[in-house]
Image: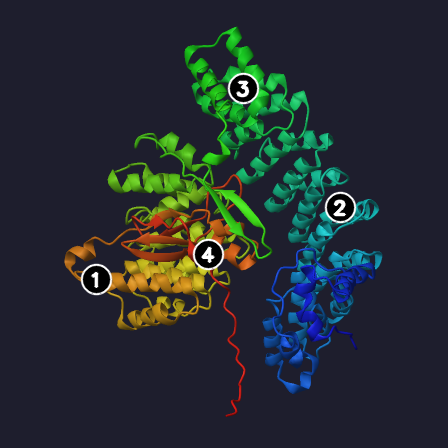
Amino acid sequence: MSRSRLPALLLSTLPAFAAGVASSAASEVRAAPEADAAQGDAEPEDDYGRYPIWPTEIERIAAPLRDPAMTTESGRMAALEELRPYATRVISAEIEFALTDPAPEVRNFALGICVERRLVSCVDEAEAMWDSGEPGVRFMALSLLSFDPSEAHLERLYEAMRDPNDMIREHAIDRLVDAPLDEQAAASARREIVGQLGDVSARVRRAAARGLGRLGPGEGALALVRLLDDVDVGVARDAAEALGKLRDERAAPALLRALDSPPTPEFARAGLGAIAALSGEELDQALLDFLDTPPRNARRSDVAWAVGTRLEPGAALIAGLVERMRDPDLREHCTRALLWMGERAVPFLEAAIERGLEPDVRLEVDRLLAARSLPATRRDELDIIETQHSEGGSTRAAAMAWPEPVAWPEADAREAWFERLAEPKELEAGAALAELARREELSWFEGAIGWTLERAGTAEAAGPWLVALALAPEGTLGGRGHTIAWGQVANWAANAGGGAEGRCLATLALGSAAGTRHEDTVHAELVRLAGAHLEDVRACAAMALVRFGDDAVLDALLADPSPRVRAMTAVAIRSLRRPAADLRMRLAVQADRDPHARARTGAAATLAKLEAPGRGSRRARKQQAPLVLLRAELSMFAAVSDADSKREALHWQRFELDGQTIDLPVFGSARPGRPMPWTLAPLAGAQVVDIDTGAAGVRPRPYTYDVFEMHM
């Protein structure tokens, strides 16, 4: 297939033309993209990337792609990789041409760049590759087809939703939901997705339920109601969440029946959230009844969240919350719900004060009203960070302030601790409980962990308890009666369908089996986890394995392809009393030559600690630093447009300890309503570096050079 290209000289001068150089040629170049768009070859609006400096720069790099016979397949792959930093409009023709390469690997790589840059001009080739490609290629082809949802391309997506491969069917649903559809096409797409709710695969049913929820109010609520009793709990949970987003009041009776006995806490929370999204006075009363007596597997804190986030709370609901504040067991939950309601609750609270309240209830109501009337923070009092984009624009973001120290329950307040650890995001509560168990003898600590882990539904729901186990005193859950609990944790860690954060927490908790009767079984499981597909699971396996002593697996993990795994392993070795000579040698190589700068810092700090004077003394061996929970901090580089810098800012954190900087991978996600990402490491006393300059590192590129001949 022949394709026309702009001369390389013209391509290299595009930045000057875009800046407004007064010439007729500039006008022609600026008009070219408009003409292409009119013909259907749309270009992305945000064309990040650099422009060539030399006239023949693009031509030189793309030469192997234009003549496949002149180089090997790997050489053409390298040429594509070298083109990636450039702006889309100057490399699109080369990428399209690479889609016709005789080597399938080159075509697949080029197709991936088309998806990454959202190049609609690649759709024709993607359609051809859909018919003959492997599953991975078909995934990318579907993504490109969804960028240009013509009638023919929509038919391709509908066809993919009936593919024998359930992963293809799932991906087709996701892409159809994301496609820019007009009103008529959106209605047709919704009907097709409703039809997938009866698919034999739970994966596809979940995708269909999530897709209907993302589409918002419309057809499909009655079909989703049938999935509330699905044999797969995940399908039932996603169906409940989708019903809340569809806001069809006809689903209310079915949701109330399902909440009579929810199968898991996650389903209960989803069902309560769906009820909160619907309107009606009878639902207000149902939420108050749930607050009085939560259903099985439902937490009162989840009911309070649903009440507080209700879209249209009635007067009776708010009055019922104020009335229930008289009950000491309900006061905290009612207070949270009223606080979440915000200004909508203020008139009712003021009316309750006028009618008269008990002194203790009046105090809580006054605090709520005071919280809603806090003085506004002046803009010039904020700590503003400004980051520059390559185009000259800027992003302004206020620096985050750490919250005040938390007051934890007393040692004998068992119910209060259970309440705190019931919140999945309260990882600090688990760490605080473990620290308390190290200082004081808690008779109920071990039994509480075992009982909770045996009955928890998912690793994410048991997150604080897993942190408590990971940081617990030696010998916790060491008895014969806790075999089921260890088996549950091992299942969570090995669950290939689980989330990375939950699996990592479970893997770290397995390290506490060292020194117990379960040591051999758990160690064998950790060795298997060290070869897991997810890099985060392998990183957490390294931190857990180090508690079993010097292991040959640690040496292998230091050579892992992922820098996150290498960095975590290097820091984990700080806990070893006497690392083997081979391990020290590999640490030295990593500290000096690791291709990833962040992986070098941890190895260097560990070497410095191992070589410190007095390291081998008996006293030093007895004072090994335990694991601690560390939180990340939002970096100023999280706001930049460059994807690599943003990934560095959100997935890594730089700490300082004893004058050394140590970079560690962090887990979790920085989303609204959730704490910052976390990590567990033997870095007691480490402080977050305020400005993490490592997040602004330049993505490494293969070094290239030209040979010049000098004539004298």
Q: Which residue is mark 2?
A: 194
Do callouts 4 and 2 mark residues in contact (Cβ within 8 Å)? no
Amino acid type, mark 4: Ala
Do callouts 1 and 2 mark residues in contact (Cβ within 8 Å)? no
Q: Which residue is mark 1?
A: 612
Instruction: Residue 369 in the image: state x and y as whole percent.
Output: 50, 19
How far is the residue under mark 1 from the one under mark 2? 65 Å
| Left or right, 513 with reference to 578 | right
Instruction: Residue 410 in the image: state x and y as whole percent.
Output: 31, 30
Establish if 708 lies above or below 395.
Answer: below
Amino acid type, mark 2: Val
Establish if 248 lies above or below 114.
Answer: above
In front of the other: label 1 or label 3? 1
| Residue at horizontal 56 percent and vertical 36 percent from the top | 269
In front of the other: label 1 or label 4? 4
Can residue 135 be seen in this snapshot?
no
What secondary structure is found at the residue carrying circle 2?
Answer: helix
What secondary structure is found at the residue carrying circle 1?
Answer: loop
How far is the residue under mark 1 from the one under mark 4? 29 Å
Q: Which residue is mark 3?
A: 321
Q: Which residue is mark 4?
A: 695
Instruction: Residue 86 in the image: state x and y as whole percent.
Output: 62, 67
